[in-house]
Image (cartoon, rainbow, N blue to C red):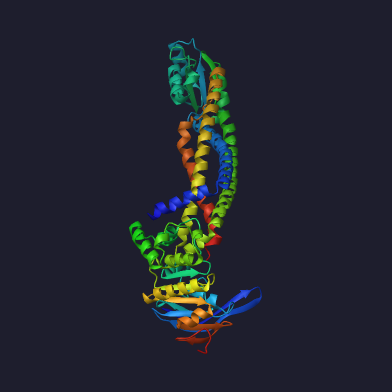
Amino acid sequence: MKFSYLIGEGFKNVFKNKKSTGASLMIMCATMMIFGLFFLIGQNVNYMLREIESEQGMQVFIKKEATEIEIEKLKQDIQKIEYVSTTKYVSKEEAFNIVKERYSEYGRFLEGYDIDRNPFKASYVVTLTDLSKSEEVRTQIEKLDSVNNIEMRDKTINALVTIANGVRWISFGILVILIFISIFIISNTIKLTVHARRKEISIMKYVGATNSFIRWPFIVEGIIIGVVAAMISILILGVSYNIIIGKIMESSITNMISITLLPFSEIVELVIVVYLGLGIGIGSIGSIISMRKYLEV
Amino acid sequence: MIEFRNVSKTYTAGKENVEAVHNANFTIEKGEFAFLVGTSGSGKSTLIKMILKEENPTEGNIIINGKDTTYLKQKRVPYLRRSMGVVFQDFRLLPDKTVYENVAFAMYIVNATPKHIRRQVPMVLSLVGLSGKAKMYPNELSGGEQQRVALARALVNNPSMLIADEPTGNLDPETAWDIMTLLNDINMRGTTVVVATHAKDIVDRMKKRVIHIDKGIIDRDDKKGGYNSEI
């Protein structure tokens, strides 16, 4: 009874000041989206880092016309080279299936391809015992027969680490700014309802309402604004992210560049947790701040 | 029971100290009816505020229902206030709630069950003579009726005492007398009633205990007095 009463009052508050609630919703959404942009870039960079770190070294693509014997010989040749740690064969079917599975939700970009009409090449993933020697290893492998091209991974790693750190700092900074702006905005909106209901609050105090009883409806109001802003942001972010990723994947397959990006389904849970956490936290802190003055009776 | 022991209250306004109440000593027993009289600025309101623990005394102790509230923690204040009903000169009703809802509101706050609320509210409304007006809004009522709603709200949680701060200040003499009679009825049912007022006529007519305060000093406490000493 008590609980539903407090929640109900909170909802009533939300609709009492439609304009200012709408304004704080929009500002929160905007700040959340900017944060989301960097958050998603950060997640992708981290993802690429992890992907690549697990296979440090290089990927040696094999000429399409190479026979099985030649492929086997290539492996033995690579293993003989100094600093080579492991070589793992990835058939072109495997490459196809890995990509197809990971991007199943973006099915369209593999349209017209199947196992028999396969755009991928077979490759050896070569890891090294010493990454700094990768150039030497590369020149040696390049001299071998059946090698089509080599894609280095250590170079990209250094660049990615720099990007990842940069993105991390930027998103952290934006997060801090977002939290401050949003708390300020929400507490101002709630101040309006608190002010509009100050008479009610003073009556409640005289009748013997505890501070938490008075405070809860306003906290609920703050949380509702925060959560709604979070949900709108997640929705817009998810839709636009999917569109952008789809476009990037399409162009990458046509240009034969291998880019690995996170599908939204793999980060949606994290995004929801982060955003709801932000929404609830900002909403409740904002309302507690706005209430302080009015509770001293 | 309300007991003031050597209570003084000094307000600090800038560099100036103003003593609103000086060394007040009195006891209002359980079930008693007492008027607190004096001109505006005499310290009457400060006494009321200290009973409600809206203000704390600078010196002395205030004992309510056997408990010294002087050092009561802020967190416990709501529970102290549940033992007293309060009405004010300006009624302080919620304009967007009906009479019924205004009274039920006080019960929500103390976590009463819906069943209890449905039973208790009509009972209190009939006590103050407003049974037929439960669905009306405060602005559809006369001043006297609004004060009755405020009284119903103050009484609905069965407080042991009722504190009224100028309850008839906004009412015409006849209505004021009706409200006072109602307060007397409430007192007859066992509730301690404290009324701060400067309505001389009513005080004289009621023949109740009168505590007179002037410039912060309680200068008279008559068991069955009038507004002025000579009766």
- The residue lying toward the viewer, choosing from B193 and B111, is B193
Residue B156 in the image: state x and y as whole percent.
39, 65
- The relative height of residue A143 versus residue B82 in the rendered view (above or below) is above
* Front-lying residue, A208 or A84: A208
Q: Is residue A130 visible?
A: no
Q: In the rendering, at what x and y percent does residue B227 appear?
A: 52, 83
Q: Residue furthest front?
A: B174
Q: Residue at x 52, y 74 (%)?
A: B173
The N terminus of chain A lies in quadrant: bottom left
Residue B100: quarter of image: bottom left
**Observer-nearest residue: B20 or B188?**
B188
| Residue A163: x %, y % from top left | 59, 35
Query: Can you see residue A237?
Result: yes
| Residue in the picture at 35% in, 63% down | B120
Q: How many marks?
A: 0
Using the rendered view, name the quadrant where residue B66 is placed: bottom left
Asked if residue A97 lies left or right of residue B218, the reply is left
Q: Quadrant of residue B114?
A: bottom left
Horizontal relation, residue B162 to residue A46: left or right: left
Residue B115 to residue B147: above or below:
above
Q: Quick check: A234 above or below A219? A: above
The picture places residue B126, in percent across and down from the top left corner, at 38, 65
**Does A288 appear above or below B204?**
above
Q: Which residue is the extreme one toward the bottom?
A: B230
